[in-house]
Image (tube, coloured by chain):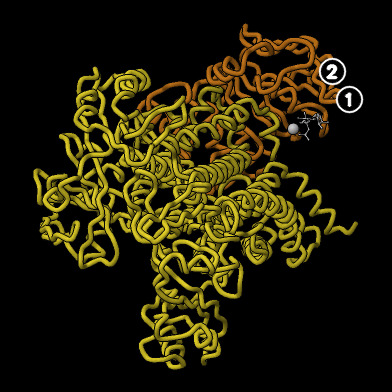
Chain colours: A orange, B yellow
Amino acid sequence: MIELRDVTRRYGDGPPALRDVSLTIAAGEAVAILGPSGSGKSTLLNLVAGLDAPSAGSVSVAGVRVDTLSEAGSARYRRATIGMVFQFFNLLDDLTVADNVMLPAQLAGMSRGAAERRAAELLGTLGVDRHATAYPGRLSGGERQRVAVARALMNRPALLLADEPTGALDSASGEDVQRLLADLHADGQTIILVTHDTALANACATRTVRLADGRIAADTLAGAR
Amino acid sequence: MSALGRVVRSGVGRRRVQTVVIGLVVAIAVTSSVLGGTLLVASTAPFDRAFGQQHGAHLTAHFDATKVTAEQLAASARAAGVSGAAGPFPTATIDPGDGDREPIGPLLVAGRAEPSGGVDAVTLTRGRWATKPGEIVLFSDGRFAGGSRAVGRVWTLEDLPGAPALTIVGLARSISGTAGGWVVPEQIAALRPDGYQMLYRFTAAGTGAQVDAGRAAVAATLPAGALTASRSWLTTRQEAAGEAALFVPFLMAFGVIGLAMAVLIVGNVIAGAVSTGTHRIGVLKALGFSPGQVVRAHLAQALIPASVGALLGLVAGNAIAAPVLSQTNDVYGTSDSGVEPWVDAAVLAGVLGLVAVTALVAASRAGRLRTVDALAVGRTPSAGRGRWAARLTARIPLPRPVTLGLAHPFARPVRSATIVAAIAFGTAAVVFSVGLAASLQRVQDAEGLADVMVEAGQREGRDRVERPAGTSMDTAAVLGAITAQAGTRGYCGTVRAPVSTPALTGELEALATSGGNCADSYRLVNGTWYTGPGQMVVATPFLTRTGTAVGDTVTLTSGGVPVAVRIVGEAFNTEHDGLQILTPIETLTAAQPQLRPREFRVYLTPGTDVTHYSDELDVALAPLGAFVGMAERGTPEAILIINGLTALLSLLLVAVAALGVLNTVVLETRERVHDLGVHKALGMAPRQTIAMVIASVVVTGLIGGALGAPAGLLLQRTIVAEMGWSAGFRLPESVLDTYHPATLVVFGLGGLVIAVLGALLLAGWAARTQTATALRTE
Ligand SMILES: Nc1ncnc2c1ncn2[C@@H]1O[C@H](COP(=O)(O)OP(=O)(O)OP(=O)(O)O)[C@@H](O)[C@H]1O
Ligand SMILES: [Mg+2]
């Protein structure tokens, strides 16, 4: 489903953030990307999301050449295919929880009524429906990340990308999110998860890719351990 | 370099756009303040300035030469309270005729060897001073001067023994208006002398009572009955204010708008700079900077570009003010080389003080901030504000990016309000100045008497006309030629006739008319046009000065015969300072049977080619002793100055408004760069981003325009009416009412256009900005 071929991403004159990375991920897989700080994990995720373009090589997702999309094309691609979860949630402070969750669907042109129903359903599933009319600032970190996950799932994306989703959470909330991701994967959701946390990787991932200095240092299937 | 200096320098360098905007806004504010302030000072008391420069006479006194000697008068300069005196100048009243033109009327002439002197230093505006008998210098504000063409003309005084001739050698302006003309003292003897004139300055002459006391002190030193007439400078000043006061209302308007705008934008820019710097302040404090250091760092960050801008603005303001002042000098009869230094100093101190105070207020808020809070803010507008608007707009059935943008202004209500005000001021300034120019044009048009003028005389070549004395045209034949000419729609024959009325001292001018189209040359403000003899139409100053109203009957004396004439209408007519009387020729023919039209105003059918018409008519008129003159269409200098100044000032104000909008959109976008990244990560397409950014300024732009356009209209009507009043005229509605409602709506939408243009510029940038980069701004 996802295919990176000889991808290099270079910023300015420095050593490339990614060099000659080739990686194939099948639908239904849950892949954890591990590696030291600065090894290129977020860069890789941004390339898959179409938020960034490689300096060389190609990125295809579900048969679409993501690296050659126009700005408008990549926005359409993200709406249709990608859900993103961030370390610092990136919820919009001035919108209610429900409005945050509805936003991706509304950007894709869904009516407010339909979006409201879908958001209510998701918030219910994720156990944060009683906060629907609250503002993100009032929620705990764990709750906020659940809302962020709900927002990411709004358009039923084929691929869920998560960058350090537990990085800003205490261990209890972290485990909470970990269970959530594991459940999603169990339901067949394809996930790419960037993390420092080996426990999280072990719990959620079927496969672990280890980056070092922009190269793939190891690529192991969970079953192989 | 100290740590503080390094922080300041990096701050100035890092926020290049804002640094430039602060500099520019301050520069423009200083430029317009220097200009406005200078002109305001120059126009608040133009008479006083001119009076001061010319050492004007506080009292102009006339004495009976049979009751007092020149020596006694010279000694009166030592009377108590007299600080200076000029004279005695022998005087005579002459009644010159100018070729075949109608009589000019009596003119007071003083015998004076020198234009200069301790009192009433007369300024020569053209030509030279009279140096020998046979020469005369005319008062250039008088109605006899006739501009530069007057110099060189010769007057023959046929009613005097020996019919002395006077050649006009110069024009001069006396702010005190002491005489209508000056000759060398020896000349007066030949002009039937009627007395002496003395010009006094008093140590105290600020009030009517003080001037009266001065007059009494002078009279006490002289034989009883010697003082026959006198005139206080306060009376002259009041009359002079009419002309100069024309400038005060609109300069006041611009001064106020300009200053309000400067306060608004400078405050907004600096408060914005400090507020986006809040996070940085937190970092600095976390690193150990004291609150005082933080405040100073911010003050410097604002004051450095502000000072540079202020100096640039000062140079520009002085550069522009100099030529403008030299133009107004002509209008006020003053001579100033440039800007008053204290205006420069006051503007500089005022604007920089304002910058410093605003920066201090905003920075001290940051200085007080707890470090933890400072570190926490800065990512998005302080949470909590305007959420009601976000909830409300979310329900509007419009695409989501649009409704998101609509809520933006409410997140920062104060800033949005200042932008609304900036747009409103900019729109108002444009509506005001365009309306003012249109009004002045309408005044001009109202004075444009006719399409073609026919006068008595013989044309010799293209531009030279001979008006032989004594010849008069064959009125009936000329009229026949005019009516026979294809393209003639109508005509109005006119002749000026001297009349007088007991309520007004001195001669009045009646413009006696014949013909059916005379009303076409005038705009009525009240009443109706006359329908027959015994009726007249006058202008507002006539009504004011005589204390009459439309409907009243006034007795005019014409050729010694009293005629009762009813005022049937009030027209806008500035001729003869608004004292000209318009009446059918038949009103006066009982008293002056020889009265015939001497000029014809000809009105053409629409679509007639004026040049072609004039050439043909000229040929037909040549044998009849008449020719086609030019209908005067020149724009007076005062109107050109007003138009130039309005254009310049409103341009500056619009520039300031646009900069203010641009700066705000930059601030907004900078503050929202992270949110924009989030939106894009969630799939917001470039077009949606642009829609959102534009929607965010639509409300502000619409409200600003909706407030500004009517405000500008109100301002225009008030100021134009005020200018009319200060000149003594009630203006016709057509002069005030220059806007079609649709035009006004277009101008109102102008505010929106400014806002959208500014937003588009940044929306493009926002849509292109690297999402990955934006999201990294954690
Ligand atoms: N926009 C950018 N401009 C310049 N350099 C960048 C940019 N984004 C990333 N880099 C560089 O690329 C390298 C990889 O960055 P990346 O964010 O992918 O690392 P990471 O593995 O996600 O690290 P961390 O675990 O700390 O998040 C780093 O050296 C970083 O400095
Ligand atoms: Mg990272």
Of all residues, the one furthest to the front in this rendering is B162
Ligand 1 closer than 8 Å to label 2 CB: no
Indicate the chain on which mark 2 is placed. Answer: A
In the picture of the structure, the residue carrying the numbered disc 2 is: A19
Callout 1–callout 2 Cβ contact below 8 Å: yes
Query: Depth check: B90 or A44 in front?
Result: B90
Of all residues, the one furthest to the top in this rendering is A63
Position above or below: B499 against B690: below
Ligand 1 closer than 8 Å to label 1 CB: yes
Considering the numbered disc 2 on the image, is that residue within a helix, a strand or a loop?
A: strand
Left/right placement of residue A56 relative to residue B183 reads right
Instruction: State whether residue A176 appears in this view.
Output: no
Amino acid at dot 1: Pro
Instruction: State whether residue B189 appears in this view.
Output: yes
Q: Are marks 1 and 2 on the same chain?
A: yes
Query: Depth check: A161 or B609 in front?
Result: B609
**Residue at (39, 65) in percent of width and height:** B93
* Quadrant of res B107: bottom left
**Residue at (41, 65) in percent of width and height:** B108
In the picture of the structure, the residue carrying the numbered disc 1 is: A15
**Residue at (50, 37) in percent of width and height:** B755
Label 1 vs label 2, nearer the camera: 1
